[in-house]
Image: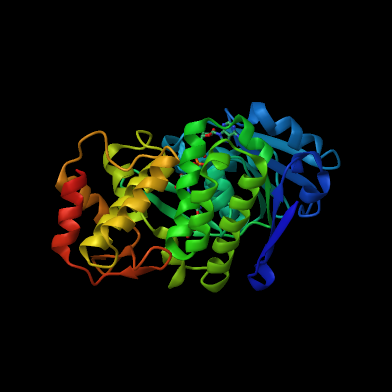
Amino acid sequence: MKKLNLNLGEKSYPIYIGENLLSQADYLTKHISGNQVMIVSNTTVAPLYIDKVKSLLTDFEVCEVILPDGEQYKNLDTVNQIFTSLLENRFDRSSTLIALGGGVVGDMTGFAAASYQRGVNFIQIPTTLLSQVDSSVGGKTGVNHPLGKNMIGAFYQPKAVIIDVDTLDTLPNREFSAGMAEVIKYGLLGNENFLSFIEKNVDSLMNKEKSSVIDAIYQSCKDKANIVAEDELEAGKRALLNLGHTFGHAIENSMGYGNYLHGEAISIGMYMAAVMSEKEGFIDQSQVSRVKSILENCELPTRLTGKINFSDFSKSMSVDKKVLKGKIRLVLLNPIGAAFVSDDYHKEFLDQTIKEFC
Ligand code: NAD
Ligand code: GLY
């Protein structure tokens, strides 16, 4: 088992990464306060892992709420099901919520924990690669609104993150690849050595060989934890984690949730950011090709298959949270391994980039 700490003063918490962690009660139970525990999962993950988690909680009063599966259910109506279950079962302020699932379950459970009786404890047990390397760490929680993705939410940190890589055994390959997009993101934005590690170990990673996967998750969480520790509320550096996201969210918004997986949309978005960085003169064609190759070697898309209207795409970009005072902020590469946030770019290059991809 490898352990990291996200250092946020009184809100600090451990991230445990390893095999077989869901067979060992201690990682979980020592972070539970109170006697009431609500496990939140979904119709896909619960049949696979909820009994295992419940078997660790024999000393607690345990309830469960099983949500429908899918990004299209990441909304306030679904979060309300969690509140209803908490109220029906008379959960009090000392209770603990456990998120058992991917980023959708994790984001909604965290948001419910932030709001139920003005805040109760919660623990993340992420079961997709994407949630293990990104969404379970750092305390961004929330839901989508028909007018924009992740527009309703709160920063609310978990008490612990328990990453059992054995859960990846049941994860479909397409979902695993989507998680690799976020792994690659850390290399591109600030850790060129890590990008080289991914390139060198791409076969063992894509074969889900445990030791490579654990190393990749560990480094991803470490890089994220360092950034969040410096800038929890995204006043500055944390915005680097949005590499590819302004383009990616526009893809998700304008194609409808569910056509592209989140990680797939981010993959295309990161490639768009690389193309835009080349137009600005920050990187050359060989570096753009390097970005394309590693994404494609991880079986990720770098092009849109359906058509998007240019003005719909631009409009979707302008409702993103990364828009500040009307200006779309982009994360660009200057060069690979050293991303920066910019609102000082050539608008015509942005338009050209969007047109090339639409
Ligand atoms: P997801 O939660 O929809 O999970 C993907 C699919 O895999 C689902 O069908 C799920 O039921 C299934 N699944 C989960 N674990 C499984 C397992 N072990 N075996 C078999 N099937 C399993 O998607 P995701 O990619 O995990 O997360 C995407 C979401 O995360 C998006 O809503 C995105 O906005 C959010 N996100 C949040 C942050 C953050 O910082 N909070 C960061 C990145 C992404
Ligand atoms: N996924 C971006 C962040 O956590 O800030």
Q: Is residue 19 or residue 84 the one in the foreground? A: 19
Q: Looking at the image, is 213 positioned above or below residue 50?
A: below
Horizontally, residue 309 falls left or right of residue 92, namely: left
Q: Is residue 60 left or right of residue 104?
A: right
Residue drawn at x 56%, y 56% is 220
Where does the image place residue 26, in percent across and percent down from the top left? 83, 49
User: Is residue 128 in view?
Assistant: no
Q: Residue at x 80, y 34 (%)?
A: 55
Q: How many marks?
A: 0
The answer to whether residue 195 is left or right of residue 350 is right
Q: Is residue 178 visible to us here?
A: yes
From the viewer's side, name the closer residue of 267 and 146: 267
Residue at coordinates 76% horizontally, 45% vertically from top-left? 36
Q: Residue at x 38, y 34 (%)?
A: 258
Give how far across and how far down residue 42 sits, in percent: 58, 33
Closer to the camera in the image, 77 or 44: 44
User: Can you say which quadrant of the picture contains the C terminus?
Assistant: top left
Q: Position of residue 344 (x, y in %)?
A: 24, 72
Q: How is the image coloured?
A: rainbow
Indicate the quadrant where residue 53 lies.
top right
Q: Quadrant of residue 82?
A: top right
The image quarter in which residue 4 lies: bottom right
Q: Does residue 275 appear to the left or right of 340 in the view shown? A: left
User: Is residue 355 shown above or below 77?
Assistant: below
In front here: 67 or 91?
Answer: 67
Q: Is residue 192 above or below residue 211?
A: below
Where in the figure is residue 175, as x and y percent of width and height? 49, 36
